[in-house]
Amino acid sequence: MLVAPSILSADFGHLARDVEAICEGGCDLVHVDVMDGHFVPNLTIGPVVVEAVAKAATKPLDIHLMVENNSFFVDLFAPLKPEFISFHIEEEKHPHRLIQKIRSLGIRPAIVLNPHTPPEAIEFLFEDLDMVLLMSVNPGFGGQKFIPSVIEKAQRLKVLIEKHNPDCLIEVDGGVNDVNVKELEAAGVDVVVAGSFVYKHPEGIAKAISALK
Ligand SMILES: O=C(CO)[C@@H](O)[C@H](O)COP(=O)(O)O
């Protein structure tokens, strides 16, 4: 299992320290939640802060856009050369065009599905995607409860991915811990995002990451 800790749960007064801690603790990706206060009722960080995160990180960035006007934000973050940029299908009129744009910038494209969105909604996009991110909470905040129906959704998604593009990864984000990660792994999930579990683990960040792995 690949682990992408969400820096939303970091101490933003010591952000570089907390980014270094997850990288030294064995994470695979640094998950960055970008929220605009419109698509979701929360506002997080822009390119100035993400540039500082990129400087502190020794692992690739996984940028999750929770915004209106995705294309504008892709342009803002592309110079930071993240590994992935993911955008919500619920907020994009031209997803195929945006996928091509992200790839043309040398970044791996990913699509995010909110808890209510079925995997079949993106059936004709799989061949162009490197990853699909399933939200297991409603986007906007860390520390929420895991929505169990994501397990069945991941199983259905896995079948579609095997048919259309077996190289496409499945990522799950929200309320992930060392118990539900086992079910996620069995459902075919490749990457988990975890914020509170990693940053608030009583035995420390490295222990939390290894428990998820
Ligand atoms: O994108 C989001 C929330 O919108 C997530 O990345 C959360 O930040 C994950 O935090 P936990 O649920 O693991 O605390």
Image (cartoon, grey):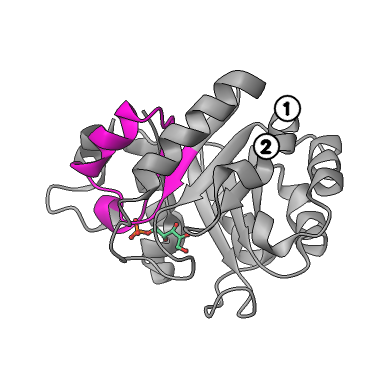
Q: Where in the figure is residue 174, as x and y percent of width and height?
A: 38, 55
Give the residue number, with chain letter if any, for mark 1: 127
Q: Residue at x 78, y 50 (%)?
A: 95
Q: Amino acid at mark 2?
A: Glu
| Gap in angstroms between the C-alphas marked 1 and 2 | 9 Å
Question: Is any part of residue 7 visible from this angle?
Answer: yes
Q: Where in the figure is residue 79, as x and y percent of width and height?
A: 78, 49
Nearest to the observer: residue 146 or residue 47: 146
Q: Are marks 1 and 2 in contact (CB under 8 Å)?
A: no
Nearest to the observer: residue 119 or residue 208: 119
Q: Residues within 10 Å of mark 2 (few under 14, many from 20)?
A: few
Position of the N terminus, as image quadrant, is top left
Nearest to the observer: residue 94 or residue 140: 94
Q: Which mark is in front, 1 or 2?
A: 2
Give the residue number, with chain letter if any, for mark 2: 123
Q: Amino acid at mark 1?
A: Glu
| Quarter of image, res 48 | bottom right
- SS for callout 1: helix
Counting the numbered discs, the total is 2
Q: Residues within 10 Å of mark 1 (few under 14, many from 20)?
A: some
Quick check: is 98 in the magenta stretch?
no
